[in-house]
Amino acid sequence: MRWKQDVYEMLNGITSTPFSGRSWSSDFEGEVSKEDIHYSIFLCVVTIIPAAIVAYVSTAPTIKVMAQFFGAPLQAVISGFLTSSLLFLGSHTNKTPRPFPTAYKLMLRIMSVYPFLRFFIINPWTFALSTLIYGFFVVRGATKTFQIPQKSAILFFGITYLVFALLQLQSG
């Protein structure tokens, strides 16, 4: 199953060598296929499971819990779009341009951990923490796929996701 393989690739060597190891650039050859589209829909639907669990155990007001539950797939779509756009822009900004299908397929690999991070939506602090963790995975994917120097990837993507996390804390 593709999801299992992508989660394995995202977590493999994360404690010892998070930004080095096997290059992923050959994993994302070709155009976006029907299988890629189906996989992206699958990832959006899977985000409902942690949202349902959080909704069941949450002590927040019912309207807020229901908004988070029904908004989970939409947030996955928005997060995926922003991630693929930032990856495409980041590869061009850091002078390692790649076509958009590469950024889209890398986004799908990064989004494989997104359903697990949805368990953090219990309060604004942990929601911001999940954004920072997601940003770490984006930096990891960018350095392993686009051969962007680690410092440049941390500056470009790290600062972007830090700002996203701060905005989530402010709105919480």
Image (cartoon, helix red, strand yellow):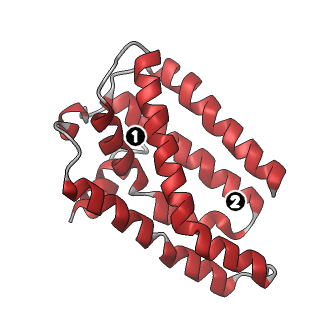
In the image, what residue type sits under mark 2?
Thr
Residue at point 35%, 58% (across, down): 40
Evaluate whether residue 7 shows in this view.
yes
Q: Which residue is mark 1?
A: 16
Q: In the rendered image, which quarter contains the N terminus? A: bottom left
Q: Which residue is mark 2?
A: 126
- Above or below residue 30? Residue 5 is below
Horizontal relation, residue 83 to residue 64: left or right: left
Q: Which residue sits furthest bottom? A: 56
Report the mark closest to the observer, 1 or 2: 2
- Quadrant housing residue 16: top left
Report x, y in % for residue 51.
57, 75
Residue at point 62%, 33% (across, down): 160
Report x, y in % for residue 11.
37, 51
How far apart are labels 1 and 2 at the CA level? 25 Å
Q: Earlier in the sequence, mark 1 or mark 2?
A: 1
As helix, strand or loop, the secondary structure at mark 2 comes to: helix
Report x, y in % for residue 152.
50, 18
In the image, what residue type sits under mark 1?
Ser
